[in-house]
Amino acid sequence: MVLPQSKKFSLFWVIVDMGRGEKVFRESKKLGATGGTFFLGRGTIRSHFLNLLGFDEAKKEILIMAIDEKLDQVFHEELSKKFCLDKPDHGIAFSMPIKRLVGIKGSDYISNVKKRGGEDMGHDAIFTIVDRGLSEDVIEAAKSAGATGGTVIHGRGSGTHEKAKLFNIEIEPEKDIVLILSESIKTDAIVEAIKEKLDIEKPGTGLLFVLDVTRATGLAK
């Protein structure tokens, strides 16, 4: 097994009005982004949290990109300048550290952060984004490595014209997003199983990233 490369990445989020997402992505590619995933969003309930994310009224485009952590400040500064994100109602951007990332330039990267001890029963969130219809393969591979299950977010809900939502964010129909909460001591094995099953290191196959979970309640033992 080839060991992952040690590097730091950020998951960069941009939320703008419908129709501006492609412009943001084109500018992001100039700054060093290698790819991105779009979601469609619109707030349907009154919520202070949704208001903060800009989902109180108009439809939104949500763009997520995995970028080198060294570019984080540049992205914030340049995109803010280009699209006036520092002004009200022009959009927002935020970023969070990624613990592990598979699928960028056909490589596997693991953050060079201090690893948890073997007795630590903390949890990680494993996100896998693949083409529509491949979610069952992801779940099957994860279960073979000790996962108890996962949540699959499809592009459509049970109704013919109903779109699936995550925190009232509509998900684009071309992709499946699989979220697996894993005990930290099992995370590496689950990631390796998904990589082998989906060949996710092959460019254009998909994207997998792992985020730290600070607290988890209600998980199956």
Image (cartoon, helix red, strand yellow):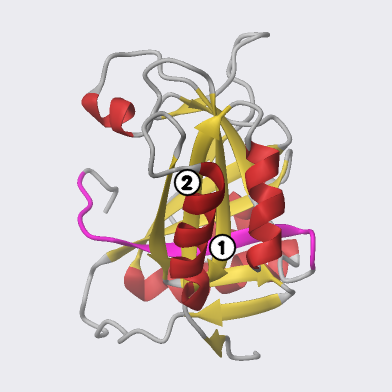
Question: In terms of sequence position, does the residue under pointer 1 or pointer 2 come before the other?
Answer: 1
Left or right, 131 with reference to 33: right
The C terminus - image quarter: bottom left
Q: Which residue lies furthest to the top in this view?
A: 160
> Which sits in the foreground, 87 or 194?
87
Disc ID at residue 66: 1
Local secondary structure at mark 1: strand
Q: Find residue 179 and report its horizontal and vertical position in percent.
A: 48, 48
Please, what is the three-letter code of the amino acid marked with disc 2? Gly
Give the extent of the magenta segment.
Answer: 203-217
Disc sitting over residue 45 in the figure: none
Work out which quarter of the rendered image holds the N terminus and state it. bottom right
For the point 30% across and 63% down, which residue is it? 123
Circle 1 residues within 10 Å: few <14, some 14–19, many ≥20? many
Q: In this view, does 165 lie to the left or right of 199?
A: left
Q: In which quarter of the image is residue 63?
A: top right
* Res 92 quadrant in image: top left
Q: Is residue 213 visible?
A: yes
Image coordinates for residue 25, horizontal then vertical, percent: 67, 49
- Residue 218: image quadrant is top left
Q: Which residue is drawn at 48% across and 20% down?
A: 42
Q: Is 49 left or right of 67, judged from the image as shown?
A: left
Give coordinates of residue 120: x percent, y percent: 21, 76
* Residue in the image at 36% along x and 19% along y: 56
The residue that mark 2 highlights is 150
Q: What residue type is labelled 1?
A: Ala
In this rendering, the label closer to the viewer, 1 or 2: 1
